[in-house]
Image: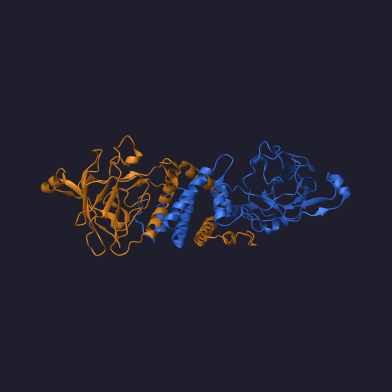
Chain colours: A orange, B blue
């Protein structure tokens, strides 16, 4: 501070940026300077009115006050403005053949239970049975034995287990699997369904005011990791799901969409413990070194 | 929604902006579109890390949760980022000879009591006595009789009355005056002092992390209005006050700074009811039609 600059409309960003000149941490200084420049440019471009500013202050205040141990409304706001997805993408540029990442989402809040290959994670008995399987490889296609495949998904009613304590069995639709010698994993689950993000708060008001729906297309979450490789946090999306082209949080990437065909193969059905015919979701994952 | 666009790093702002295409209110659509463009440009410019994003989410959450009936931490955040001042300036461009505006601030929360010209507003008996006086005119210099001059200021200890209920007399250092036939107003007060904005919350943490102080230079708040003229919300700042060139909320404009000289004039001192010599703060106000 003490820059000798007084406020002017034209020089507003420079005056405020100058106040951060003494910031000891160089990175914080850069981030705050850029934030002020972009924020002032926004206010100037739209010539924000005092009434609109007051609405924004009230909105941000209520967004903070909606947060508690089970609800993070500011993450939801970041999600519906595409900021979460942008930060995720910038920090995990995939490159080459590696599997692309997408948002972690707010529901990876309990540790997934270790399960054996082939186990059924659908503990509530709802939904359309489905075999989920794939292979984890390195960039050159080499299979990775012993890779960890952490998965979680919402149930047929559109809720994660942690959203319905006492309704869903604990750890429903979660599992931690380890690939076999060929880098393969497989387990039984149900075909994922689309569901709405929580829309009874300020973010829901914003979606309603802008004629946006709160739905996410059907997907299954993955975190795949292995020693010597970079882990990937991603989803696989179900081809043909409603909202695939209008995900409320912009999580969909073309490379992550998969068909979930019906397979008529009595021998295989019997071997995996599913009635024939059955649905199969195949998702191969390529990790970077 | 349903734009058919999937998320990409390069096209992130376009994809999110497209989600607002169906917003019924054209102004809201424009504001949200511009917000997304500037917000994404900021994230891309600094390549925000996931850890920094998490710090921002936590900061915004705590800022909302610090707010209550007596504290508005998001307004304080807007203030220290110069956004309040920018919005104020954009919406009240003065032009010509009209008195420039500055921020209202958060302490005009009670109605100022009507007082007679010459009254003393310093009810707590602290500080350096001062005559405050001036003339309210129109743009051509014509005096405005019957103009309303609403004033408020912090006391010698740096607090407004509403910050110290039970400590300061109610309505201490507040007054609503009406100009005489010559457009003149005058009252007794004390020379304003500098003071810190509340810095025991997230905004205080931000100031500390960026080596900024929380002080505002000495000032007296004014709202001046008259039928047929545009009201002006402003301050007069005391020349030579500490922090004049580093106001924590960027409220200072060159045109609003005034000397508060000592006057040696026994007759005038007696006529206004002050000991001689005394200090005088003269602030003429020009309203636009």
Q: Can residue A230 be seen from the camera position used here?
A: yes
Question: Looking at the image, which residue sits at the far left?
Answer: A267
Number of numbered tags placed on the structure image: 0
Residue A115 image position (x, y, % from top left): 24, 46
The residue located at (31%, 58%) in the rendering is A100
Quarter location, residue B124: top right
Closest to the observer, A163 or A146? A146
The residue located at (28%, 63%) in the rendering is A97
Report the side of B196 relative to B282 (left or right): left
Closest to the observer, B257 or B186? B257
The residue located at (48%, 42%) in the rendering is A65
Report the side of B177 relative to B9 (left or right): right
Report the side of A252 relative to B273 (left or right): left
Residue B144 image position (x, y, % from top left): 75, 48
Q: Where is B56 relative to A26, above or below?
A: above
Question: Looking at the image, which residue sits at the far right?
Answer: B267
Residue B62 image position (x, y, % from top left): 50, 46
Q: Can residue A49 be seen from the camera position used here?
A: no
Residue A69 image position (x, y, % from top left): 42, 41
The residue located at (69%, 40%) in the rendering is B112
């Amino acid at each position: 501070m003490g820059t000798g600059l007084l406020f002017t409309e034209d020089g507003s960003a420079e005056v405020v940026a100058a106040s951060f000149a003494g910031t000891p941490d160089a990175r914080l200084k850069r981030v705050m300077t850029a934030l002020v420049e972009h924020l002032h440019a926004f206010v100037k471009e739209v010539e924000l009115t005092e009434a609109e500013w007051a609405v924004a202050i009230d909105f941000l205040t209520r967004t903070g006050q909606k947060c508690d141990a089970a609800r993070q409304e500011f993450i939801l706001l970041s999600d519906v403005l595409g900021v979460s997805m942008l930060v995720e993408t910038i920090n995990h540029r995939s490159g080459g053949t590696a599997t692309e990442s997408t948002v972690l989402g707010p529901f990876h809040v309990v540790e997934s239970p270790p399960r054996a290959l082939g186990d059924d994670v659908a503990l509530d008995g709802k939904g359309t049975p489905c075999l989920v399987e794939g292979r984890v490889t390195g960039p050159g296609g080499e299979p990775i034995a012993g890779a960890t495949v952490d998965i979680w998904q919402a149930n047929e009613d559109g809720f994660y287990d942690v959203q319905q304590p006492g309704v869903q069995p604990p750890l429903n639709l979660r599992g931690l699997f380890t690939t076999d010698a060929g880098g393969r994993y497989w387990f039984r689950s149900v075909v994922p369904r689309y569901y709405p993000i929580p829309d009874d708060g300020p973010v829901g008001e914003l979606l309603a005011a802008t004629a946006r729906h709160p739905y996410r297309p059907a997907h299954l979450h993955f975190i795949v990791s292995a020693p010597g490789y970079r882990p990937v946090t991603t989803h696989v999306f179900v081809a043909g799901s409603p909202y695939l082209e209008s995900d409320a949080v912009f999580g969909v990437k073309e490379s992550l969409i998969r068909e979930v065909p019906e397979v008529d193969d009595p021998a295989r059905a019997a071997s995996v413990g599913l009635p024939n015919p059955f649905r199969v979701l195949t998702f191969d994952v390529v990790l970077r070194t």
